[in-house]
Image (tube, rainbow, N blue to C red):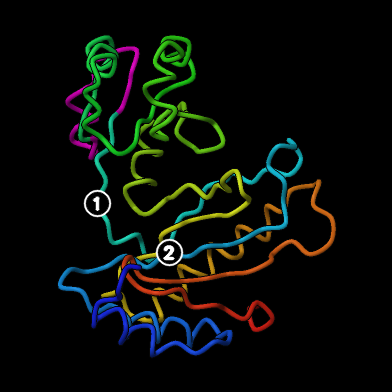
Amino acid sequence: MKTLSKRSKIARNLILKKTYSIEEGITLLKQTATTKFIESAEAHFCLNIDTKYSDQQLRTTITLPKGTGKSIKVALLVSDDSNNDVLLNEGADLVGSDDLIEDISKGNLNFDLLLTTPDMMPRLTKLGKMLGPRGLMPSTKAGTISTDLVTALKEFKAGKVECRADKTGVVHILFGKTNFLASDLEENFLAIYEAIKQNRPSGVKGKYLKTITICTTMGPGISIDISTLP
């Protein structure tokens, strides 16, 4: 049986077997961030959905008002690479056409996010097995297929994130870093909560949100009292 570290025991002892308001929960979350590195703040929304049905799936995007606290490397796949320098100046980390497709096919995935235009998608289908399992295949629902790559690039760099339920109906999402102000973490959390409510799948019957838990990267779960949320 794995023994808990002294740090983990202290963190767990801070949390009672009860639910907390989001304000109380974030206060506790910051108190349990005791590692030597700056941890991420995570939220886990357990939904009453069965994702094997098309009308019970959740996938949308949210722009976190206070950002993610994390810099991401964004690649742009374009049909015309004559404007590569312009796109790099706009903040893209990688820009390419056939050369980028070739790099991807060789397993060189030196980016966190891939944006492209609709006309390039047929050329990406052969790379589905490479990109799909890593969550890098562009899609309209994820906002990663766009006719305006500059705008899409700036949105994701500014804190736009994908909100998607996994096969078990749980949304796992980061809402900042533990060195954020508590008020900023709360604002980001509520933006996610509102987006999940607004995008309730049409096939859901009865109670939609089952449980919400927040935690740090290395910390214990903190249960949030859904009835106290706006």
Say which quadrant the C terminus sits in: bottom right
Label 1: how many Cα within 10 Å (few below 14, some 14–19, many 20+): few
Residue 69 seen: yes
Q: Which residue is mark 2?
A: 65
Toward the viewer: 163 or 33? 33
* Position of 40 relative to 127 (above/below): below
- Magenta-highlighted residues: 76-92
Quarter residue 38 falls in: bottom left
Q: Is residue 181 above or below residue 76?
A: below
Q: Position of residue 194 (x, y in %)?
A: 61, 64
Disc number for residue 5: none
- Give yes or no for residue 88 being in the magenta stretch: yes
Name the amino acid, label 1: Ser
29 sits left or right of 95 in the view: right
* Circle 2: residue type: Pro
Q: Residue at x 27, y 9 (%)?
A: 98
Residue 215, above or below 97: below
